[in-house]
Image: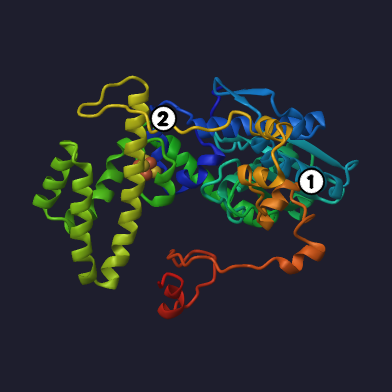
Amino acid sequence: MSEHAIISPSGMSRILLCPGSVAASAPIEDAASIHASEGTAAHKLGEDSILLGVSPHDLVGTVITADGVDFAVTKEMADAVAMYVTMAEARHEEMGKDETVMLVEQRVSLEPHIPETWGTADLVLINRKDLLVDVWDYKHGKGIEVEAKNNTQMMTYALGVLSKLREEGWTKEELDAVKVNLRIVQPRTASPVDDNEWDVSPAALREIYKLIKVQACRALDMMEGKIEPVFTPGETQCRWCKAAPSCPKLAEAALAEASEFWSESFRDEVENQILKGNEKAAIHKAEETAAVLMPGISDDKLVDMLASAKLAKTFAKAVEAEALSRAMQGNILPKHKLVRGRSTRKWDDADALIQMAVDSGLSTDELDLMAPRTLLSPAKMEKLSGGKKRFSGGPYASHVVKTEGRLNLVHESDKRDAVTATAEADFSEFAE
Ligand code: SF4
């Protein structure tokens, strides 16, 4: 059995949108980034903490090996994982420990109904008496916040769990009545929340199952050469696709708009500058030209171009990541070289240093200069309290104010309510 599923729950949103991506990715080796490997180590810390019944903080200083890389468990990693472990234990308690089975890093599968479709759910809680099933996913990443609602990865896990329960003798009536809750815990985002969850009905799961079956089988047929692969570029599906740097359809889509917008001679000039190493001059020239052209573009055209711009960004990131990865593996890329960024100085052991300063007799004022005390945000306090509002609830709650988020332009399908912008109000914060 291969270590990675061909139709994996984590790739499900991509496979549903671009089934050809399975064939395109198949020959490309998995190369885990250091961030992905660190995430694997954090998952292992969560698993060990739950199974051993200890706090992740008790394991600080131990080493976890993930993808062949050793990661020392740091306080920062333990803080993040502690939120997940504390919430998981509280939920186990709430569901009734005696009646609830808690499964950690559980293999769940849709085989044989849908071939090659399986994955590992981080946490599954099952209470047959009350007909409750919880499926949890821990996300160690801090860049992109992942929603539990309508999350096809989570729904695939849930389908795998229900399929297993059917095999274990749950009746059709029980499976029709079960309350399935999907939850994502992602402690390292800027504002971690403890309610990123979604109740999904068995009927809704059956609907998504039909779609998964159709697209997964198409994807496998494309991979086996039984039908012609179909590629559908788009920001969501291309962002994490292994085939992105070499995908002709993505490149085509990304360049189509640019070809229309920039004249050929302009593009040649910019490309030549970049190849000669005058990257800054090329970027400056492109920025200048864009600034001149933008005001003359209609709203409709701009909207068309937004979609292409996102694809172009995805493609550019994939190309840059691939080039860096090849260079790091020792490939000499023509006209390029690998260099180190500026090195920075940092303390090797902040706690030991502060202790040394205290022992040397520094005054409190001097210590404050050296290590200023800052008030943490309510979200960070809750994260450090394992998801509890110890320092941000009760009497402290009256001092919590919510600032308005920055305005973002998103597609109308986004679940957030639209706001009406008033140029005067919204730009006042940028006024001198
Ligand atoms: S890069 Fe995009 S279009 Fe190409 S195979 Fe991957 S998901 Fe499909």
Residue type at numbered disc 1: Thr
Q: Which residue is mark 1?
A: 171
Q: Secondary structure at mark 2?
A: loop
According to the picture, the residue beneath numbered tag 2 turns out to be 26
Q: Residue at x 33, y 25 (%)?
A: 327
In the rendered image, the quadrant that contains the C terminus is: bottom left
**In-image side of 219 versus 260 (left or right):** right
Residue 345 seen in the current view: yes
Residue in the image at 22% along x and 60% along y: 290
* 10 Å crowding of disc 2: few (<14), some (14-19), many (20+): few
Q: How many marks are shown on the rendered structure?
A: 2
Viewer-nearest residue: 316 or 274: 274
Q: Say if residue 166 shows up in the picture.
A: no
Q: Position of residue 86 (x, y in %)?
A: 77, 43
Element type at mark 1: loop
Image quarter of residue 308:
bottom left
Residue at 8% over, 50% down? 265
